[in-house]
Amino acid sequence: MVTIGERIKKIRLDLNMNQIDFCSKIGITQGSLSEIESNNNNPSINTLIAIHTMFNVDFEYLLLGVIQKEQPINKILRIYESLSEKDKEVVERVAEGLSMLK
């Protein structure tokens, strides 16, 4: 059975983020995240809310491991939210350019 810590680690790795960057987004220390990912500690409700909010991760997946089929727009938003501000600007310019091709 996959633990909540393992799911959080998978989310972080799927976002191609290191622990420091992930922690800065959700407001916890790297030590706390390491303890969670190693299953030595459980995340607080505030940490779960931060992961849900920042990366658009379903609570049911976080808590129970139940995978809902992710809608394409949610995947795009989740990836976009993990980008640096500079990279977000690039994505926005590309999207604007693509919209003009219609």
Image (cartoon, helix red, strand yellow):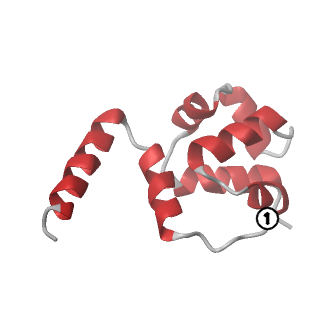
Which quarter shows the N terminus? Answer: bottom right
Helix, strand or loop under label 1 = loop
Where in the figure is residue 44, as x and y percent of width and height? 83, 35
Residue 34 visible to an observer of this rendering? no
Where in the figure is residue 33, as x and y percent of width and height? 71, 35
Say which residue appears at 63% left-offset and 43% top-offset: 53
Closer to the camera in the image, 11 or 99: 99
Where in the figure is residue 61, as x and y percent of width and height? 75, 61
Three-letter amino acid code of the residue under disc 1: Gly
Left or right: 79 in relation to 59: left
Say which residue appears at 16% left-offset and 71% top-offset: 102
For mark 1, does the 10 Å Cα neighbourhood hold few (<14), some (14 to 19), or many (20 or more) residues? Answer: some
Where in the figure is residue 13, as x and y percent of width and height? 56, 53
Residue wearing tag 1? 65
Say which residue appears at 58% left-offset and 48% top-offset: 55
Say which residue appears at 60% left-offset and 51% top-offset: 56
Give the number of callouts: 1
Furthest residue to the bottom? 69
Closer to the camera in the image, 41 or 63: 63
Q: Is residue 77 above or below residue 66?
A: above
Residue 39 visible to an observer of this rendering? yes
Closer to the camera in the image, 31 or 45: 45
Left or right: 4 in relation to 75: right
Q: Quadrant of residue 99?
A: bottom left
